[in-house]
Amino acid sequence: MNYLEQLLHAQSPDWPAGLPGGLRLSVLGEGLLAIEPAAPVFDLFISCGIHGNETAPIELAASLLQEVLDGQLLPRARLLFAFGNPEAMRRNERYLDDDLNRLFGKPREQTGDGPAAQRARELEQAACAFFAASGSRWKLHYDLHTAIRGSKIEQFAIYPFPHEQAFDAGEIGRLAACGIEAVLLQSKASPTFSYYTRRHCGAHGFTLELGKARPFGQNQEVRLDKLEAELRRLIAGEQRDYRASAAQPTLFKVARELVKHSDAFVLHLDDAVENFTELAAGYLLAEDGAQRFVVEEPGARIVFPNRKVKNGLRAGLLVVPTTL
Ligand SMILES: O=C(O)CCC(=O)N[C@@H](CCC(=O)O)C(=O)O
Ligand SMILES: [Zn+2]
């Protein structure tokens, strides 16, 4: 059985007796492992399965990891792999007790101490320890996801709010090289893993949305060839400069977040409406008791509309075209 099969069967993995070229393997927890060459050129963190039913990127990350473990892919970058929520992966569920990607960077008083909160803390600590040991080297984190709905733009990324720093054109160009067609520039802090590693670990953290979520083995329509090629280059220690690259994604900025405040929340969108559908100014998008959420921004598009989130959480993003 390969590593992913063992993880999905909750079996202790059979680790290779030794890795080639002086590589060091450290198992930091379930679904959490670091692979370190003796003289790394930079530090790369690939996470997936933060939502257990988002399987295409889990399959990709697992196959790259397997090649490293089998000695077929020799890393020159220091690597951390995280399979975020193994139990949710086993059950093909987005999450179990709580949405992991709403718990990062939050105090215990807000998250409680359930399994998801504990896992978020374990992932935070692993990421911070990994990046703390990388000193001044370049640090990259791709948190790989797929979306609940279909999308007018199939592959896109979320660039977490960088606070006092500028959005990095080279990293946006790298995302284009990965096949990412659009980048959403966040305008405020988020409780997500990519925001966390950016804010607290000094990494270039991004969330990548790679297509529609489907069960394991049913991802033939998810095209990951460009992402895979760039990840292979990165694992091998090649840091390309994409600042002047001709291929650039379309940029959007997050104009407003739609938040579900109560059980009275009503979303006025059919389940078939795809991400990036344009909504006319004046459109009544949602009602929450006496509160009305009306689209005001010209050219606004809706991303991640979800009536089923818990109260207090994001039920959609309203994005508008922008430039750097
Ligand atoms: O399709 C959806 O509604 C959600 C897909 C997903 O899991 N997206 C991430 C985005 C994280 C971010 O904003 O950086 C999420 O909602 O956690
Ligand atoms: Zn997700």
Image (cartoon, helix red, strand yellow):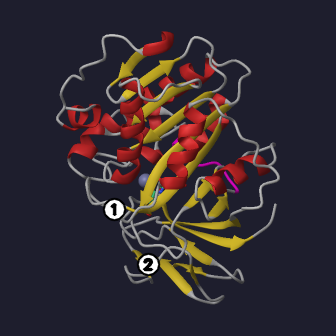
Q: Position of residue 237 (x, y in %)?
A: 62, 29
- Position of 283 compared to 172: left or right? left
Q: Position of residue 261 (x, y in %)?
A: 47, 64
Q: Which residues are magenta?
A: 187-193
Image quarter where the C terminus lies is: bottom right
Residue most extreme to the front:
72
Mark 2 C-beta closer than 8 Å to ligand 1: no
- Could you tell me which residue is drawn at 54 percent across and 41 percent down? 231
Q: Earlier in the sequence, mark 1 or mark 2?
A: 1
Q: Main secondary structure of the magenta part?
A: loop
Residue 8 on the magenta span: no
Give whichever of 320, 189 is nearer the camera.
320
Hey, what amino acid is under mark 2? Answer: Leu
Residue 220 image-quadrant placement: bottom left
- Could you tell me which residue is drawn at 41 percent across and 62 percent down? 222
- Could you tell me which residue is drawn at 55 percent across and 21 percent down? 130
Q: What is the distance, in whole Å, between disc 1 and disc 2 at their CAs?
A: 32 Å
In the rendered view, tell whether residue 37 sits above or below residue 323. Answer: above
Label 2 crowd bin: few (<14), some (14–19), many (20+), radius 10 Å: many
Tell me the number on the disc at residue 93: none
Q: Position of residue 197 (x, y in %)?
A: 60, 35
Give whichever of 298, 264 is nearer the camera.
298
From the image, tell me which residue sits under label 2: 267
In the structure shown, which secondary structural element does the residue marked by tag 1 occupy? loop
Tell me the number on the disc at residue 220: 1
- Could you tell me which residue is drawn at 48 percent across and 79 percent down? 287
Hey, what amino acid is under mark 1? Answer: Gln
